[in-house]
Image (spheres, rainbow, N blue to C red):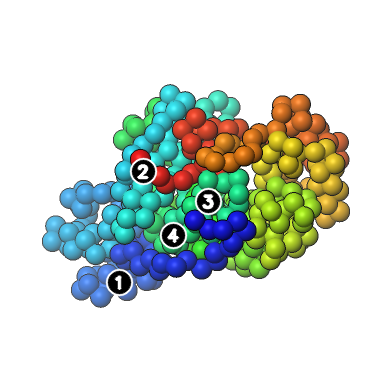
Amino acid sequence: MPEPGELTLEPARRGKPPRHLADLDVDGRRKAVAELGEKPFRADQLSRHYFTRYVRDPHEMTDLPAAVRESLAGSLLPTLVTPVRHVETDNGTTRKTLWRLYDGALVESVLMRYEGTRPRVTLCVSSQAGCGMNCPFCATGQQGLTRNMSAAEIVEQVVAAERMLDDGEVPGGPGRVSNVVFMGMGEPLANYRPVVEAVRRLTEAAPSGMGISRRGVTVSTVGLAPAIDKLAAADLGVTLALSLHAPDDELRDELVPVNTRWKVDEALDAARRYFDSTGRRVSIEYALIRDINDQAWRADRLGRMLDARGRGWVHVNPIPLNPTPGSKWTASRPEVEAEFVSTLQARGIPVTVRDTRGSDIDGACGQLATVTD
Ligand code: SAH
């Protein structure tokens, strides 16, 4: 376990998961297939099976000659995530899965299906096993960083969710993953390249990738300012969420230890630049912690800081604190939460309080921790 405030930007363990086609772009896959002695176009066939039909069994790849199926699937489609267990709530429409990776590392993802006027399926994915950011109110942060995940390990969580939907394991009939949020375990921007590759696989059309709408993808970060600028330049069209949790450096140094490297102003400036170059409205995440960061004066200060950077570029997503083991903190009182929200709204800032879906199965924000008791 890390000491309070201790940051881990580089993992001690270097993962080298088996090679998978989702780690490679279209050209890389064609090359890999040619090296295996097959025609390069087989790479596209294989890709369609994986990214659009989520095929597991090579026998189903009937457009590939039988002998070729086994060898190509064997070398380019290894199984990278194996379910250890599923835990469900909301009549099965919220489903947390614990996955074992090739080296025994454990991660979790959470599927949330919403009905009603805006039906959607959101998958919350992990980008690292554990996390090195050490935010004291987050269960994953208390676990420390085990290792970075590969692009394919990230994508496999989404493909596995599509299979669950296809197999009727989630009530509500046939469906597809419409939203992917990098809000599971890990700090996505501390594992930059694989995360960007994974986003490409998720959002590019077949045979390159799965064809999920870019607008449906959100990358959430503690505020690694240089990496936010890099992400903007990568032009992926995804939404950025910034985990702020305090408008003042004094408190944020404690709640989000990476603030000792990139201060509130630097994180907010980077977020604003992200909006400027992508046109995507940024989301500010703010876990409301009773008597710690939930005072009206902090809401007002946050409002002023956002306003000072312009209008229409940002909205605030307060998250009632979800309980985590051993934490001394709890969620804000309802009337305090309401005042926090109205203080921001009075400044014309759009606010949406995040629901606490999955908190009863330790599947909500900040509750993912891979204890296998
Ligand atoms: N490392 C990234 C991705 C994690 S996203 C990030 O921090 O943005 C998960 C979101 O849930 C983050 O905004 C995180 O700060 C927040 N969170 C963590 N622990 C929480 C808790 N106990 N209750 C509510 N939100 C929490």
| 6 shown above or below 177 | below
Q: Going from the N terminus, do you reach mark 4 or mark 1 first? A: 1
Mark 2 residue element: loop
Q: Going from the N terminus, do you reach mark 1 or mark 2 first? A: 1
Q: Quadrant of residue 261?
A: bottom right
Is residue 313 visible from the viewing direction of this image?
no
| 75 shown above or below 49 | below
Give the Cα distance between marks 4 and 1.
29 Å
Kindly tell me whether mark 3's CB lies below 8 Å from ligand 1.
Answer: no
Q: Extreme left residue here?
A: 67
Q: Residue at x 35, y 40 (%)?
A: 373
Q: Circles 1 and 2: CB distance less than 8 Å?
A: no
| 31 shown above or below 222 | below
Kindly tell me whether mark 2's CB lies below 8 Å from ligand 1.
Answer: no
Give the Cα distance between marks 1 and 2.
37 Å
State which mark lies toward you, 4 or 1. Answer: 4
Q: Residue at x 62, y 58 (%)?
A: 5
Judging by the rendered image, the residue that carries numbered circle 2 is: 372
Give the Cα distance between marks 2 and 4.
15 Å
Q: Quadrant of residue 92?
A: top left
Judging by the rendered image, the residue that carries numbered circle 4 is: 146
Q: Circles 2 and 4: CB distance less than 8 Å?
A: no
Judging by the rendered image, the residue that carries numbered circle 3 is: 142
**Residue 135 or residue 182, whichever sits in front:** 135
Q: Position of residue 13 (x, y in %)?
A: 41, 67
Judging by the rendered image, the residue that carries numbered circle 1 is: 32
Q: Going from the N terminus, do you reach mark 2 or mark 3 first? A: 3
Mark 3 residue element: helix
Q: Amino acid at mark 3?
A: Gln
Mark 4 residue element: strand
